[in-house]
Image (cartoon, rainbow, N blue to C red):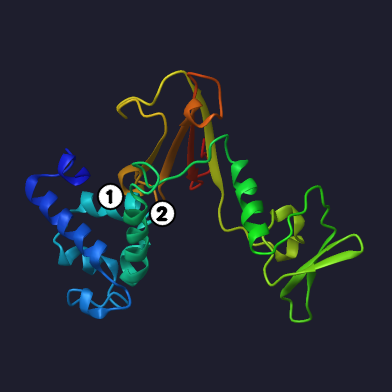
Amino acid sequence: MEGLKSPLMGLFEKKRLINMYKFVHSVDLDNKKTWEGLDLKKQPMSEVFAHFNLEENTIDFLGHAVALQTSDTYLYEPAEGTIKKMKLYLESQGRYGESPFLYPIYGLGGLPEAFSRLCAIHGGTYMLKTNIDEILFGSDGQVEGIRSGEETAKAPIVICDPSYCNNDRLRPTGKVIRAICLLDHPIPDTNDAKSIQIILPAKQLDRHTDTYISMVSYDHAICAQGIYVAIVSATVETDTPE
């Protein structure tokens, strides 16, 4: 239905897009009979798009706005990973409202709150106001857990802010720049949406990676009535990211 409404495509391209959606919806990655003669584990995603004769703008949309790939390198990688991401997007559509994206009421503080409940169900312990004095490593250099005072907690993986780690174990992989904008109106040309995720594909901005605009509002109880909070974020690619 969204595809048919879109002013970005002609009638024939809409038909081709819908065929692609039907394929993604019905494909079973464990059953080659559903792959329509393609080899999703070996063939790159570019060949899958070519199979459906999709135009460049449609490929941009599917790869970046549906599969949420951040650059075009996915086109040359086995299609299986991108198809899996597209299936997740389609399965998420309409699950909790119209959008496949979720944002917690009262803001991101809702995430640790939900995690603590899930942690308790699975027998985990959630410890607040606990100092981490040391990350423990084995003789093989692999992480073994953490130490807090005289107590230790064993774990095969530690997820943490870089400030907890020794500098010799850090490897920067990139930087992100963000602009946080407080608005007294919704973003223009978005049907006055109270929340929205806008993805600007890298190619259309002459960049290597995508630019994201996420907007939330009083609808999520994160700010005062009538206020909208928009966050523009992008990977730093130049010496003057601002």
Instruction: Give the residue at x 41% y 29%.
Output: 194
Instruction: Give the residue at x 17% y 77%.
Output: 37
Q: Nearer the viewer, residue 99 or 197?
A: 99
Q: Nearer the viewer, residue 48 or 168?
A: 48
Identify the mark at residue 61; answer none if there is no mark: 1
Residue 188 locus on image (x, y percent):
33, 24
Instruction: Give the residue at x 22% y 74%.
Output: 34
Residue 126 locus on image (x, y percent):
73, 55
Identify the mark at residue 52; answer none if there is no mark: none
Please give left or right for residue 198 compared with residue 59 in the image. Answer: right
Identify which amino acid the numbered label 2 is placed on: Thr
Q: Which residue is mark 2?
A: 70
Residue 79 locus on image (x, y percent):
31, 69
Residue 72 locus on image (x, y percent):
35, 58
Please give left or right for residue 193 compared with residue 124 in the image. Answer: left
Above or below for 84 versus 13? below
Above or below for 61 versus 136? above
Helix, strand or loop status at disc 1:
helix
Label 2: few (<14), some (14–19) or many (≥20) C-alpha neighbours in 10 Å: many
Residue furthest to the front in view is 121
Q: Nearer the viewer, residue 25 or 216?
A: 25
Please give left or right for residue 137 compared with residue 218 in the image. Answer: right
